[in-house]
Image (tube, coloured by chain):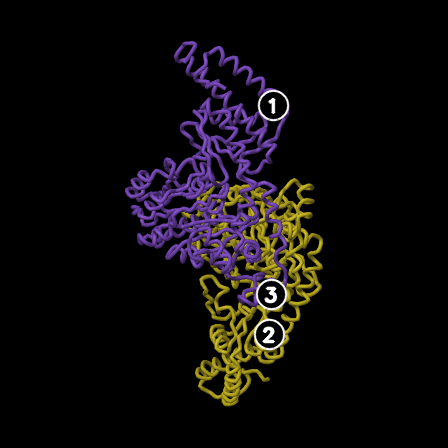
Chain colours: A purple, B yellow
Amino acid sequence: MNSFFRIDKESLITKLNKMKNEYLNIKKRKLKLDMSRGKPSSDQLYLSEKILNCIDDKILNDYREKSGIDIRNYGCLEGLPEARSIMAGFIGCEPNDVIIGGNSSLSMMHDVLTHFFVKGVNGCKPWSNKMVKFLCPSPGYDRHFKLCEYFGIDMIQIKMLKNGPDMNQVIDLSENDEKIKGIWCVPKFSNPQGIVYSEETVDKFSRLKPAAKDFRIFWDNAYSVHELGNKKIEIPNIFKKCRETNNENLVIAFCSTSKITFAGGGISAIGCRKSNFKEIKDYYSFKTIGFDKINQLRHIVFLENKVSNHMNKHSFILKPKFDLIINSFKKNFEENPIIEWTEPQGGYFISVQTFGSARRIVDLCAEAGLIITPAGAAFPYGDDHEDSNIRIAPSNPNIEELKAAVEIFCLCSKISAAEKILESVFRRSNSNTI
Amino acid sequence: MNSFFRIDKESLITKLNKMKNEYLNIKKRKLKLDMSRGKPSSDQLYLSEKILNCIDDKILNDYREKSGIDIRNYGCLEGLPEARSIMAGFIGCEPNDVIIGGNSSLSMMHDVLTHFFVKGVNGCKPWSNKMVKFLCPSPGYDRHFKLCEYFGIDMIQIKMLKNGPDMNQVIDLSENDEKIKGIWCVPKFSNPQGIVYSEETVDKFSRLKPAAKDFRIFWDNAYSVHELGNKKIEIPNIFKKCRETNNENLVIAFCSTSKITFAGGGISAIGCRKSNFKEIKDYYSFKTIGFDKINQLRHIVFLENKVSNHMNKHSFILKPKFDLIINSFKKNFEENPIIEWTEPQGGYFISVQTFGSARRIVDLCAEAGLIITPAGAAFPYGDDHEDSNIRIAPSNPNIEELKAAVEIFCLCSKISAAEKILESVFRRSNSNTI
């Protein structure tokens, strides 16, 4: 297909009408497709079926004899030692720096914010008593931003570059405004772009000297072992770097097994050091008598020394889905560059940049039976100034559904682009060719 | 044994010396006994061993086909319908009024307090912005009071009578002070006395007209099916009563299966109506993508239509332990009334009233190798004005351990009483007999 930018008005109108016909035919099929959330597929969930029944009374008794801990009973607030080791591996900290939580790392982020809101950070005034701002690399994870909204935290957009957040902006803002108390980071395979933070980015984070003493980096290492394909990607270890820069209190890291075992039934963890660890553990001692250690033991039995092998199986299922989307984008748009997209080496999303027609594309898709994450969702307050970003989540549909979905998405992208060009470019130039 | 109050000073001194010798001999045995927390025993935990492996892929698939819900994946924030039904049964509300949580109802109480602290109740100002007081029937559950302490909520002690909190005090205070925003209630088999709220008590709660619009009753129905023995005890249904008095927004109820299945691996629930339900569900939609539905399905398979039979097994294990303690108290103290105790028909605790020597008894026990809940723990701020209350938790030790434990407890009670009588009564009266 020739680029829409290189054909004359009449041809573009003809093309648009043809595409609209095609669109109407698709609508008639009354499809129900969903690429809106990073949900694992059934195939992926089956990879962990053995975790359902991997412990019995004998394993429980053996574990109790070895450790002295009856996992069925109350107690052991920070979690089982072997679970702390596994999660420390994902986070890149020491097992003793880890507190294991329930099935949701988002809940743990909420918990830390709650504690800072109610009690403050390390002797500083509670956040409930003052104006609090967060830096939000954008586009980013919508649920991080929703948490900020819940707590009334002001969000400042930070540009995402190809090696991570724009560190000049991060440094400049955080070191000069003591109202800025934190930043959200997904350092490996960022949501939604799949960006991997570079050595330089992490280095700069470790050297940060925020104006606010109670500034913390919320390091959500959600995709630490979630490569697509065989190439393992290492991000620099922020805990090590912060030890070197004597800045260990700066980072609070999070992870979960939601995309390793079961999205709805995994375990989560916080990794942090020094006063952070003490404060957060103290906080949890008010909130609970202990998290679910039975599920922790299931994860120990199922995952210990088997993570890499297990994640390869996920990759085996996921990579063809990403490839399908990206190959389809290449086929459709390499010569007609009306959208741009990321080609992540891991994680759960592809980020698409449109030229100001994100909302239109999402609406067109919805009408044709394909649900996509709402346009703007990946921005604080849903505010994508340029209406350009769309998040694609290829994991949940099967290959057949994905084929149909990407076909719809490409068609809708082209329709909206043709509309836009006809509406703006030709009208403005008042001519028959651009 | 004759009452200490009826013997002369010399005989009491002789008796005390004999008891101290006995005490020294016990100390030499270097026992390690613990009656401090309401932890189920191993025997009780084994009752639920089948829950560990009660679901497999077939059950999962059948459930998905029937309900459309893949329990392994994200979603279904309010919980699986059948789990909501089971928990509604414990709480005494409708399944649609229930939100299922993780393994800790204490966490859910924390969550509700968090939400009220951050956002306020139903349009009222957030609790973070104002002085908040809670009514605390005392002695009560230490962890309720710790939560208040965490949130900086002022606690006001309310006297517990034999049918529940002193409702005159509750009505008088809550209807005249709009700073009072809540009350903690354990309506059935209260912790630590085992008191059951009467019809009149619940009735008065349902008719409460608190000065504060954002006053809520935190109704912790922790022991709803936890009878000791065969006699089933019904408490009046507060939700029904509040519907009749048009006061449905007054109550937020909690329960868990911590003392039904596994103390560390159960499920919890909130039951509430109208604006409470909407607000709390909205709050959770920020905090999590959903709780662990796999554990919910385990509980459905294991408990559905089997609760009563299952709880009888718990009673079969627990009742002899309570009987042992109470019979020992009768034997030791019926004719020498230096302590008083409750004789609960359910729950996890026996409450002991001493005559101002709770601390001394707990210390003596500790030195002899028996850990008891710290004296005062059952009061807000640990403040038992009269130093009189001790909470006994008979569930965790086995019968042999309990025999040793109660022997020590009785001895220490007698030593402290003899000391006290010698120190105060004889000194004051300066005579040889009282």
> Alpha-carbon neighbours of circle 3 within 10 Å: few (<14), some, or many (≥20)?
some
Q: Circle 3 is placed at which residue position?
A: A61
Residue B285 picture location, percent across and down: 52, 42
Pick the quarter of the image with the C terminus of chain A: top left
For the point 43% across and 25% down, which residue is it? A356
**Most foreground residue, B382 or A341:** A341
Q: Are marks 2 and 3 on the same chain?
A: no
Return the chain for callout 3: A
Q: Secondary structure at mark 3?
A: helix
Return the chain for callout 2: B
Disc sitting over residue B133 in the figure: none
Query: Is residue A355 something that shows in the picture?
Result: yes
The quarter of the picture where residue B309 lies is bottom right
Q: In the shown orientation, is residue B309 left or right of residue A340?
A: right
Return the chain for callout 1: A
Spatial CA distance of label 2 from label 3 is: 23 Å
Amino acid under label 2? Leu
Residue B210 picture location, percent across and down: 51, 49
Number of numbered callouts drawn: 3
Residue A395 picture location, percent across and down: 55, 38
Front label number (2 vs 1): 1
Q: Are marks 2 and 1 on the same chain?
A: no
The quarter of the picture where residue A59 lies is bottom right
Q: Circle 1 is placed at which residue position?
A: A27
Amino acid under label 3? Asn
Amino acid under label 1? Lys
B251 versus A285 height, above or below: above
